[in-house]
């Protein structure tokens, strides 16, 4: 008698893919931020940012603390301007590709500020914000592009996302992140199979 055996690749495929639970993605490490509010419609936009605290320092827990309102302004001179600031993003992608989540996708995070896209204002109300650890103008790590692609594929499956843009596109003149060092074409290539939708038209292929 032949005993049916699962093929090794089938076994691998059965390994559990991250899922969504009440707007939380199990592929990320969850830290609930108080900086959030309910939304009245599903997100249709993803806004990409870059951040590092202090600027250019690509390690430590300052960004996480900023989003949780536990950053001590006395710890570094550059933190003084952040005293009392209440901000958040849904996701934070670290240099090694580790993904942290601070706000459920079903709620608004406070990442875009004064912003508009295609004539519509207040992008926070109808977007998901992703912070990528880095500095605008500098390059990002290969592990971050891989993690971003995986995260974005999960987001577009869960929410009716039409476009993925940068903070620099929804707040031109005021914001410049993720900046010239971010390779949109690399992300577009990684997502080409998943039919993500339209990318900003002003993006030149890099
Ligand atoms: Zn930003």
Image (cartoon, helix red, strand yellow):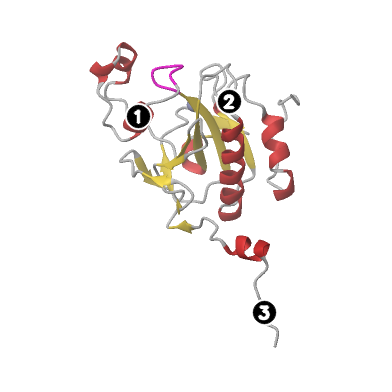
- Residue range in magenta is 52-57
Q: Tell me which numbered mark, 2 or 3, is placed earlier along the sequence.
A: 3
Q: Is residue 18 magenta?
A: no
Q: Mark 2: few, some, or many residues within 10 Å (few <14, many ≥20)? A: many
How far from the left and from the top, in percent, is residue 121?
52, 34
The residue carrying mark 1 is: 61
Q: Mark 3: few, some, or many residues within 10 Å (few <14, many ≥20)? A: few
What is the quadrant of residue 152 in the picture?
Answer: top right
Are the two marked residues, 1 and 2, in contact with CB atoms closer than 8 angstroms? no
- What residue is at 60 percent from the left and 54 percent from the top? 157
What is the quadrant of residue 29 in the picture?
Answer: top left
Asked if residue 197 is positioned above or below residue 15 in the image, the reply reads above
Are the two marked residues, 2 and 3, in contact with CB atoms closer than 8 angstroms? no
The residue carrying mark 2 is: 140
Q: Nearer the viewer, residue 169 or 121?
A: 169
How far from the left and from the top, in percent, is residue 108?
42, 43
Q: Secondary structure at mark 1?
A: loop
* Marker disc for residue 4: 3
Calculate the distance from the C-alpha at mark 2 to the C-alpha at mark 3: 46 Å
Q: Nearer the viewer, residue 58 or 157?
A: 58
Specify whether residue 44 is in view. no
């Amino acid at each position: 008698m032949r005993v049916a055996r699962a093929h090794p690749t089938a076994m691998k495929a059965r390994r559990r893919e991250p899922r969504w639970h009440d707007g939380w993605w199990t592929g990320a490490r969850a830290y609930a931020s108080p900086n959030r509010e309910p939304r009245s419609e599903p997100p249709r936009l993803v806004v990409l940012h870059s951040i590092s605290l202090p600027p250019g320092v690509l390690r430590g827990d300052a960004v996480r603390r900023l989003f949780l309102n536990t950053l001590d302004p006395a710890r570094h001179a550059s933190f003084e301007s952040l005293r009392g600031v209440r901000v958040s993003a849904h996701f934070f992608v670290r240099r090694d590709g580790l993904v942290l989540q601070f706000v459920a996708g079903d709620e608004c995070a406070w990442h875009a500020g004064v912003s508009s896209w295609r004539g519509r204002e207040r992008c926070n109300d109808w977007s998901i914000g992703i912070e990528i650890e880095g500095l605008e103008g500098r390059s990002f790590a290969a592990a971050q592009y891989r993690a971003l692609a995986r995260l974005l594929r999960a987001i577009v499956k869960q929410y009716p996302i039409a476009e993925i843009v940068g903070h620099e596109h929804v707040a031109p003149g005021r914001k410049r992140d993720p900046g010239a060092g971010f390779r949109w074409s690399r992300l577009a290539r990684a997502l080409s199979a998943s039919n993500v939708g339209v990318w900003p038209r002003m993006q030149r292929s890099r």
